[in-house]
Amino acid sequence: MRVLYLDDEQPLVLLVARMLEHLGHAVSGFTNAGEALQAFKASPREFGLVLTDMSMPGMSGLEFAQQILAIDPKATVVIATGCEDPNWADHARASGVRDVIEKPLLSRSSV
């Protein structure tokens, strides 16, 4: 499966891409939401999963997810966040986001 991964922190993009590639997935990693949207618009059916950080400059992960879902309402979008507010996660899911996962994506026990 090809994964589109967006995070404003380049080292995290590289780390998560490497992890997903190790699991057999192809990854297109981005640090810029506009560039990630252009890649998705060019081939929306190419991506089996869109994974995005929530807190980024310029465009939040939820805004990015909403734009992805406007292009392809069937897209599978997951947001990674450090926010522990369950109401926020419910709001994101009501907006069409498939799931919200907590950061950090890696725990010490998994490294």
Image: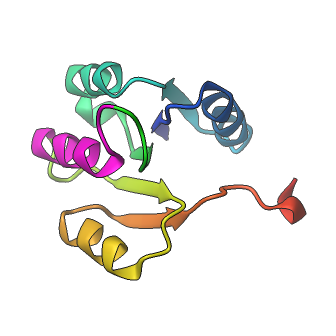
Q: What residue lies at 35% left-to-right and 47% top-to-bottom?
A: 61
Q: Residue at x 51, y 27 (%)?
A: 29
Residue 59 falls within the magenta-colored stretch? yes
**Residue 104 is a magenta residue:** no
Q: Is residue 96 above or below residue 52?
A: below
The percent position of residue 6, horizontal first and vertical second, equals 45, 35
Q: Is residue 64 left or right of residue 78?
A: left
Q: Quadrant of residue 94?
A: bottom left
87 w.r.t. 2: above or below: below
Q: Position of residue 73 (x, y in %)?
A: 14, 51
**In this view, which residue lies farthest toward the front?**
57
Return the residue nearer the eye: 17 or 81.
Answer: 81
Per the rendered image, the range of residues in magenta is: 58-71
Percent of width and height locating residue 89 = 36, 72
Q: Position of residue 18 (x, y in %)?
A: 71, 33
- Predominant SS of the magenta segment: helix
Quadrant housing residue 109: bottom right
